[in-house]
Amino acid sequence: MTVKKITLLAVFICFAGALSALETLLPPIVPIPGIRVGLGNIVTMFILYAGGKWRIYDAYIVAVLRCFLAALITGSLMSAVYGLVGGVLACTAMTVVQKLFPKSSADGQRYDLNYLPFTGVCGAVFHIAGQMTVAVGFYGSKFVLAYTPIFLASAIIGGAFTGICAMLLIKKLPKKLMKNITDDSK
């Protein structure tokens, strides 16, 4: 791994962690505890779809380390546990979905960016599945699953939003900057 890639990876981790922490610190969009958009997933999807030197394991590194960074910023260790399980499942789901869709697009990307909103929804749904699993284990009761329909509805909306944000980010960043981010050379 080159110094440039390690540096960019650190920047991505910090950016994703800051987005996750910011989302925790902002007033909730709806008055139901636990519902968030999942802004940190924008960075994970960016890495999965940017191409060049970025690989699947880089997305996992960001997904895992951003949870710990956000927990350090917010002071909530429990959010790290929820985020870690949800983040790993979300990254896995997004990777599988990415592989299922066509590999080429008109703008020369490695994967077709038009599928990013669906990729975001799948990641968000699996993130919720992971968090609900942790909640059942933590509370020792299946009654927390009563919130599942509400969380799934929010995951669909939030996942589509983050997918659109990642798609726009990749499409709208200046080509020179994208080339610098994805360039395989030292």
Image (tube, rainbow, N blue to C red):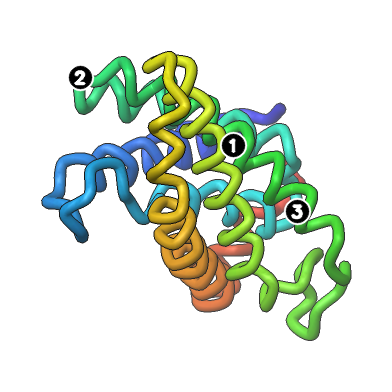
Q: Nearer the viewer, mark 1 or mark 3?
A: 3
Please provide percent x and percent y for residue 171. 57, 76
* Amino acid type of the residue that numbered disc 2 sits on in the rendered structure: Gly
In 3D space, how far apart are the residues under numbered discs 1 and 3 (Cα atoms)? Answer: 13 Å
Q: Earlier in the sequence, mark 2 or mark 1?
A: 1
At x 63%, y 56%, the residue is: 122
User: Where is mark 3, residue-wise?
Assistant: 52
Q: Nearer the viewer, mark 3 or mark 2?
A: 2
Q: Which mark is residue 75?
A: 2
Q: Quadrant of residue 97?
A: bottom right
Q: Earlier in the sequence, mark 1 or mark 3?
A: 1
Give whichever of 11, 86 is nearer the camera: 86
Please provide percent x and percent y for residue 40. 42, 46
In 3D space, how far apart are the residues under numbered discs 2 and 1 (Cα atoms)? Answer: 30 Å
Q: Quadrant of residue 106?
A: bottom right
* Amino acid type of the residue that numbered disc 3 sits on in the rendered structure: Gly
Give whichever of 63, 27 is nearer the camera: 27
Q: Tag 2, which secondary structure?
A: loop
Count neighbours of disc 2 (C-alpha within 10 A) and say few if under 14, some if 14 to 19, many if 20 or more. Answer: few
Q: Tag 3, which secondary structure?
A: loop
Whether residues under marks 2 and 1 lie with C-beta atoms below 8 angstroms apart, the answer is: no
At x 86%, y 73%, the residue is: 104
Q: Nearer the viewer, mark 2 or mark 1?
A: 2
Give whichever of 96, 3 is nearer the camera: 96
Q: Earlier in the sequence, mark 3 or mark 2?
A: 3
User: Where is mark 1, residue-wise?
Assistant: 4
Please provide percent x and percent y for residue 165. 46, 68
